Amino acid sequence: MKYLHKLLMGFSIAFLFVALTGTVAMYLSQQALKESIGNGFIELAEEAIDKIDRSISKRIEQAEAYAINVAGDPDLRESNTRFAAMDDVQGYIDEQEREWRAAKSDELTPFMQALILNPLSREIRDEFLLEAFYREKYGYPVFAEAFATNAYGAVVALSNRTSDYRQDDEEWWQKAKEAGKYVSDFNYDESAGVYSLDIAVRMEDTEGNFAGVFKAVLNIREIVDIATVVHLAEHNEEMDFRLLDREGRTITATDDYEVMEAFASGRLLPRLSAATAGFFTAKSSDEREGDEFISYAHSRGSGEYAGNGWILVIEHEKEHALQPIYRLRAILVIIAGMSVLVVVVICLYLYAIVSTPIRRLRKATEQVAKGNLSVKMPVESHDELGLLAADFKKMVVALDASRKELDALNKGLQNKIEEGTKEARKTAEEAEKAKRATLNMMDDLTEAMEKQKRLEKIKTEFLSVTSHELRTPITPMSSEVEMLLGEFFGKLTDEQKKSLELVQRNITHLDHLISDILDISKLESGNMKFLMKKGSLVAVLQDVVETMKIKANERNISLTLKADAIPECVFDHDRIAQVARNLVNNAIKFTDSGGEITVEAINQGDYALMKVSDTGIGILKEDQEKIFRPFVQVDSSMSRNYEGSGLGLAICKGIIANHNGRIWAESEIGKGSVFQFTIPYKLSAMKGEVELFNYSEEEALNRFMEDIKKKGYRIVQGKEKELLGGNVIDTKGKLRYDLSLKDLEEKGYITGEDNHQQEHIGSG
């Protein structure tokens, strides 16, 4: 890379850092400016909506104050008294309602005229509506309509004809009666013929009893003509305002609009409803126009008026609203461009100053490279380049002396290389001989292993095929015996029945033996399927105990279950039930009448420990490991009387091993036995093949001790059984889990000196 390029790169990196910092600063400045602009528009929107809320609140207070006068009026009291004396008030109101509705819209019946011309109606027009006063001042009436009803919902006094005589079925009447006051949302009043807000006030007599409801229809034009909104529209030509109800429908706006049109129901309403005030940019509804900058404020109410959820929206063209930001961005871009230009000019100037002496020095180095060690140094300056040239001259002198020394060394080195080559050739020939011998040994070992695998496969296939062939005739035999016992072919004598029952028991025994042989062959070949699913170990044990209680009761043996709170874990429910049944069945078989069998489930933290304890005949200590091997039965005078295949416990061991657990027995002759197995809560990956019968517990422990002894560790005295019972070591003397020796040392299983390496004994 040329020096100019490096110089440019250095300046570029520095400039990029400055540019990045400037970009971040510009971004933050723009955001702050945008926030300031948005907050300014929010203040305008809040000012306008607050004035609208105050105006509505003032008119509500005006209606409330006047309702107090109406509540004490004699006409209202007389109406309530008269209605209270009627036998059928609702019938009277319904009849007047039908006549009221039957009259034409421009027709006044005598009954209507009597109501409109009564003193209370004149008072409402003269003292509350003040139509002439408001028309002269604003050009329109502030209240388009007002009337009062009695406690039964019938109109008592009105400023002009209403659409109905009966009012107690209206929402505003019911809510005003219940809450004391009601303000409707923006709507079109048919009887008044204007867009309005309905203000309804509950009236009570001097004793606090409900006397009726006073309703005033507030003309919406007062809201439209509020001075702040007019100011926004007239003095800011680049912005428009829009007043929306809570559903996003337009109440009024400064641009073209239709009352109640859905301005923001789908496109903007969710964003306008996100907060009580805010601003954002959005696509214009008119595709011919650019983006819009929208600020808004929600109605917050005033005094006792809580607001109707209205939203005042100020719309700007984005380009105009954010013009200060665009102006700032343009200035910064111009400054950045000029800075780049200045940097390039400075780089070219510096390159011209530095590159000339460097080129001269380079020519001198080319001469030295060609072997000309008498070259003169062209640089005579006293700066860093001058010092470099002086050092270069010293180096040339040193090179000349070194070249002479190298020539002498080369000759001696060549002689040594020739001697070393002869030795290396001899060593290579010896290594080749050793390699051939090793390969021959490996071939012999591989052949022996393959032969062993073939023998194992033949044995497994033989057991599988034999058991299948034996089972084929058993099914029809069993069926025939059942039919004979059922006397389908004629009556049987007692002797015949006893003989057939003996045959049936032996067929059943043979069928169980064949099933056990099949299970053993599947376990040894790794073909036994396990359906692993999450469930309760305690529930499985409960089912087994309930099933086996029948057999235990027949022999007058007590069978009980004691279980801790065992968390749910993943296991094969049927296979674990098979193990539990086998152990309970053996306990029943080897326990005399009146004995006790206890099944326990104990939570050990990381795993569950299951125990089957009995008060049976017991097992010799030297036989307690043998019984888990296939086809092994304890050959003693006590056990010969009990039938069995010698495969049940071997199958149990295989099933538990496939759950990464461990099974063992503890017993004392004449005092009973305790069979225990463990199930880890976190099941590791299933094994493809299961080696069930390789080593005894003692052999596995010895292998583990030898392994860790090589690494400078030993088992802590008294922890041997915990290593086995805790399901830490498998039948090969290997760690079942991904534990290091350091982990075992921290847990207090082993101890060692200065051996803290994180070594692992892999899973077997």
Image (cartoon, grey):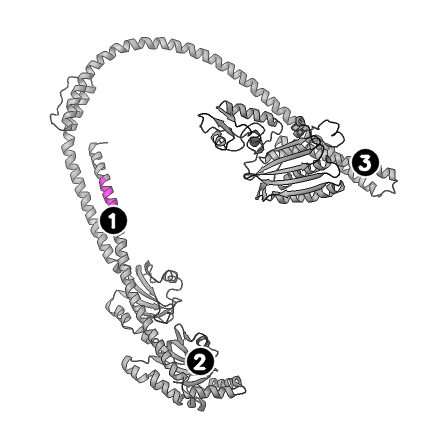
Mark 1 vs 2: CB contact within 8 A: no
Horizontal arrangement in the rendering, residue 665 relative to residue 135 (left or right): right
Horizontal and vertical percent for residue 50?
31, 69
Q: Circle 2 — which element?
A: loop
Tag 3: Cα neighbours inside 10 Å, few (<14), some, or many (≥20)?
few
Judge whether residue 648 is colored magenta.
no
Q: Circle 3 — which element?
A: helix
Q: Which mark is residue 208?
A: 2
Q: Earlier in the sequence, mark 3 or mark 2?
A: 2
Horizontal and vertical percent for residue 302?
34, 70
Whether 371 is drawn above or below 589: the answer is: above
Horizontal and vertical percent for residue 306?
38, 69
Which label sits in the foreground, 3 or 1?
Answer: 3
Residue at the spot of label 3: 502
Q: Main secondary structure of the magenta part?
A: helix
Horizontal arrangement in the rendering, residue 369 relative to residue 90 (left or right): left
Q: Is residue 255 visible?
A: no
Question: Which of the image's four quarters has the N terminus?
Answer: top left
Whether 614 is drawn above or below 74: the answer is: above
Viewer-proximal residue among 445 and 497: 497
Horizontal arrangement in the rendering, residue 101 relative to residue 544 (left or right): left
Question: Label 1 amino acid?
Answer: Ala
Q: Which residues are magenta?
A: 14-24
Viewer-proximal residue among 154 and 161: 154
Q: Which mark is residue 25?
A: 1
Q: Is residue 686 visible?
A: yes
Cα distance in 3D space between marks 3 and 2: 100 Å
Whether 576 is drawn above or below 624: the answer is: below
Q: Earlier in the sequence, mark 3 or mark 1?
A: 1
Indicate the quadrant where residue 340 lies: top left
Question: Label 2 amino acid?
Answer: Gly
Q: Earlier in the sequence, mark 1 or mark 2?
A: 1
